[in-house]
Amino acid sequence: MTLGLVLYFGNSAAVSGAGTEDNNNNDSSQQKQLYLRGVDPALAKQYQPNNANNFVCLDGSLEIPFARVNDDYCDCPDGSDEPGTSACNNGSFYCVNKGHVPARLSSTRVNDGVCDYDVCCDGTDEWDYDNGAARCPDKCAEIGAERRALEETEQRVHALGSQKRAQIAYEAKELRREKEVELEHKVSELDELTARLAKAEELKNELEEKQRLTREASDKSRDARKQTLEDDYLVDIVTYRKALSHELHKKRLHRDTLILILRSVREKHNVEYNDGAVKEALAKYAEFIDAYPYMEQAALEYANEDEKSRTERQAQMDRDNEAQDDISVAACCEAVGIYENELETLGDDITLLYELLDKLRANYDRNYHDLAVKAADVGLGEFELTRDRDQAAIDAHNSAASIDTLRERVAEAKQIHEDLASATDDSPDEKKDEKEDEEDSATFEQKLASARTDFWDLQSAKNTLSGAVSNIRELLEKDLGPSDIYLPYSGKCFSLDTGEYTYELCLLDRASQVGNKDSARQGLGSFSGFGSSGSDGSTDYTVMKFTGGTKCWNGPERSITATFECAEDIKVISVSEPEKCEYLARMTGPFACPVDDKDSADAIRSQSDNASNDNTSNSNSNSNTEVVEHKHDEL
């Protein structure tokens, strides 16, 4: 058996046994070099016999006769004396793999009867045919060709991706310049608007002060004071009443929604499960409905009403209330009191019903798989989204209307009205000089109304413009990656339908999961930063992290980490859930392609300028996706 000593003489080679062999080559110019089977050529010098014709283990721990190298017996503690056999379980066999890539194979797999083409495509690890080794033809040409073809494809993909990234870098540079110019213009516009608003406020205050002084001097009778009350406060009270009416519409629907969810549990839950949490929730709901039986009927009417009919009904209610309540301060104040009382009651009812459902969601027995209870679980999540969205709209509406100021005005009007109602009849002197110059008064009131309108219009315009300025500044101050490569795509969304769910990732913004059957949306978090790499923790701009999503039942808040791979197009190619409620997304895009953004952007700009110049000269001369892993998690 030849264990694998190969003697190289210049360009010729011969295989011999484990020991050395002296061929007595008389040509002193031709140096004899030994090559042993399984040895990395880079280590060939260390596999030459020393002056004592011995081999020194690579770790220096032992010196053995050179004849014991590759003799199928492990002598060296590091296994280095058996590079071409399986004698040492800690050794390695070097595969030349001509036509492909050299590789190392564990010595334990040498002559094991298996063609290890994934490592040794040349089949040289199976050489001892007489003792059970497999006959493994050399497949390196085929495997190497496949690898080179794959590398060429990857190179083409990377080239296109790098070109796209360079283009994005140029677009980002231009977009930043446009945004900076836009910001400069808007800041200048805001400064001008602020100055105009200050003048408008000054004029309004001056006219209101004049009105106040005039009325103080002329209001000598109760009738005059009543009229002043109407003139000064009615518009503000009407505005406040309408704000309350707007909020009432939302809160009534909130209460009806919660009633319908609990009613559905009561009607459809499986009583045989005998779930204690369900029984407790329904018992308290029954107490509530028994006290207010009409509420369930009202909720059912709401459930059977489409959006268009509901909107028309609410609009008709608003018109009826305007005709009835907005005719005087007294009538409008009375309506305000009714609205405020109803809002307080609605708030108590919503809190009670929500707490019943929230406690049910936390405590119901999930082993029963009660579909009615699970539907209530999902319904409560959707209600929370609607409630929060409506509250944000109410807050924005109230802020725009300066609701706190209006509330103070209503309180003042109520006090003045009460004072007037308790006052005695006017004295004869107070009845004198009742008539004012109606023409002058009408002209003044028109000027005051115009001044107030101008002030509020300018205030609204300033708020809108301030928001736009803040948004641009926030965008430009973000970390947008090297050369602002994420700037053109900030907030843009990309999705993947996996069958059960659709995942949506909005770059630098947010991520979500939507059930394709029930359309239930779960937040997977908001953008919290890029990844980090290396021991120095440098920023990895190919990784985006989204955290703080919807909390899993009995688990953490949902989160997702998106990792980009180099490609020309931006896509979500897979989503997995390796840990409960912690998702991983694979995405493609030019952001992960290697390129010098600055130089490439300048080059594209230069090419663009050259092309533009050439065109000018010519003009003058002519006059669904990968499979997704997913672990089901309940809400």
Image (spheres, rainbow, N blue to C red):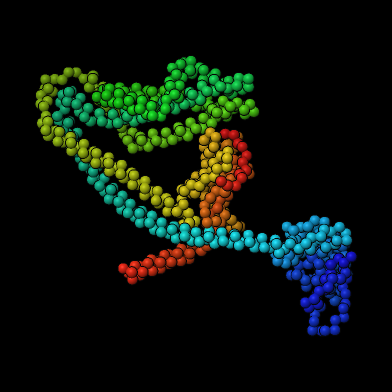
- Relative to 360, is 100 on the left or the right? right
Tell me if residue 251 comes above or below residue 16 in the rendering: above
Place residue 197 in its image quadrant. top left
Place residue 500 in its image quadrant. top right
- x then y, percent, for residue 244: 35, 28
Tell me if residue 477 comes above or below residue 82 in the rendering: above
- x then y, percent, for residue 168: 47, 58
- x then y, percent, for residue 265: 54, 23
State whether residue 201 appears in this view.
yes
Tell me if residue 326 comes above or below residue 559 in the rendering: above
Q: Nearer the viewer, residue 503 or 352?
A: 503
- Which residue corresponds to the image point at 32% horizontal and 54% vertical from the top-left? 185
Quarter of the image that includes the N terminus? bottom right
- x then y, percent, for residue 455: 25, 41
- Which residue corresponds to the image point at 60% horizontal and 36% vertical from the top-left? 633
State whether residue 93 appears in this view.
no
